[in-house]
Image (tube, rainbow, N blue to C red):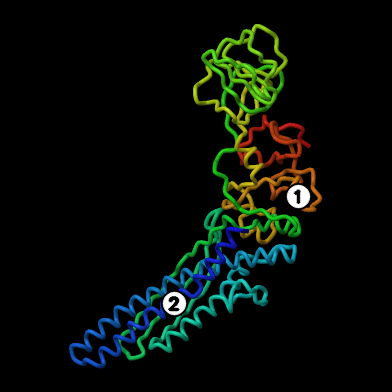
Amino acid sequence: MKAKTDLLMEGRRGQFFSIITILMVLPIVAFSITFGGAMGGYGADVGEQVRLKSSYHFYHSVEDDLVRASQILGDRAILSSINQIVEEGEGLEDSSSAIRELITNGTLDGDQKPLMGEHGMDGWTDRIEDISLKRGYEVDIEKDITGVSTGSPWEVYVHTDYDLELVDSGGLFSLRKERAREMPIQLEGSEDPLIAAGTGGLVSMEIVACDFEHLTESLASGDGENSWTYGEIVVFENGSDIGDLDAAEDKILVLKDEVDHAPLEEFSGAVLEKEPEEHYEIPYLVVDEIESGVFENGTRAVLDGENDKITEIENLYRMWESSCYIPGNAPSFLQRLENDPDARSENGLNVFLRKGELEAGGVQTRDRSNLAHIYFSDEDVENCRVKGMPESFKIDKKSTGGLGIPETLTFDCE
């Protein structure tokens, strides 16, 4: 919530941007009126030019701030919607309509929301029109929030039609523009409403994008033996001395060298270029050639002797560990505001729950897929454990393909 709190502080500073702009521009306008009236003739022409230029600048400042105000109010509407979900413990009936109402007049279901200021966008336009009128402008702003949509997994778009007209009270000029705009509201840093509703407001989770795209990657195939194992990869080559390696039992040895007398049994598993002459109980994989750069030290991987492959799961583990989000076929943010875990969208968001954090927050956990929208749904799914992941971690079989998790990584499905 920190990112959104910072954004609200910025919004408060920017809320009166147009008013400040007016106060800065109006002395120039006042000067132009006085100068033109005092000089007459040529001086009057100069005064009119000054007034025209300053008014043109003022007009575009109001237009720019109309967009800025819509974005600020959009951010506040998102936060107000989430606060409502936390307070009520249930989703919104129609998230798009709720956001439109909040932006337009600062209310939700008719109740004024403090974060939205006084009367939302209506209040903002009324203040601009009143101040401008006192200073010699008739400003008329007609606007309509025509819709709210998810433009991407990370943005909500507020669609606005507006008609902005500025008329000089002295009849010198008038400016008018009709336009349709899409104002993006960034979602990163917002609280996930699906988590808030699913836990009755007891647990919060901030939407943060993962810094990777794939969750698993096949590193090599070959001839495997002895079931499967997992651990961090440690690479030795060119006659390097393996020596004493801390926690070798938690590591997969990648050895580009002769295997004779290598302490393979000390490791969780091994990837070799040569079939060992001795018998080893640990899972191992013999490949034709260990390519440089394919295996990286410290990378979490699953060595599967039964399926003759080694697969990197570093990003899968990181996604669970850090609770970061990836796009995919899941509920979108607007659908999450409605607490609809069964909904699906091409702009959906996927995140894994950490059941220990749910328990710490006072939420009773379920032996179910850690994928948040599946976990909170009542959908009948087949839940599987995943090789190399903690015992509490499960994934529903239906979601594995879309997330890029090979079926060979799953086991104990029920």
Provide residue 326's location: percent of width, then percent of height.
59, 46
Q: Nearer the viewer, residue 243 or 138?
A: 243
Q: How far is disc 1 from disc 2 in space, using C-alphas? A: 47 Å
Q: Nearer the viewer, mark 1 or mark 2?
A: 2
In this image, 169 relative to 394: left or right? left
Q: Give the secondary structure at mark 1.
A: helix
Q: What's the amino acid at mark 2?
A: Ile
Residue under the image location 57 percent in, 66 percent down: 8
* 276 w.r.t. 173: above or below: above
- The foreground one among 255 and 63 is 255
x 55%, y 41%: residue:
212
Question: Which one is nearer the viewer's eye here, 214 or 318?
Answer: 318
Classify 10 Å Cα crowding around label 2: few (below 14), some (14-19), many (20 and above). Answer: few
The kind of residue on which mark 1 rests is Leu
Q: Is residue 128 left or right of residue 47?
A: right
Side of 327 where 19 appears, left or right = left
- Sort mark 1 into few (<14), some (14-19) or many (20+) by Cα contacts within 10 Å: some
In this view, 96 is above or below 198: below
Q: Callout 2: helix, strand or loop?
A: helix
Which residue is more in the foreground, 406 or 12? 12
Q: Name the quadrant containing residue 263.
A: top right
Instruction: Please determine whether, in this image, residue 336 is positioned above or below residue 17.
Output: above
Residue ID at (57%, 72%): 103
What residue does disc 1 label? 358
x, y percentage for residue 182?
48, 65
Q: Which residue is identified by label 2?
A: 20
Q: Position of residue 210 (x, y in %)?
A: 57, 45
Q: Quadrant of residue 230?
A: top right
Quadrant containing the C terminus is top right
Circle on res. 346: none
CB under 8 Å between callouts 1 and 2?
no
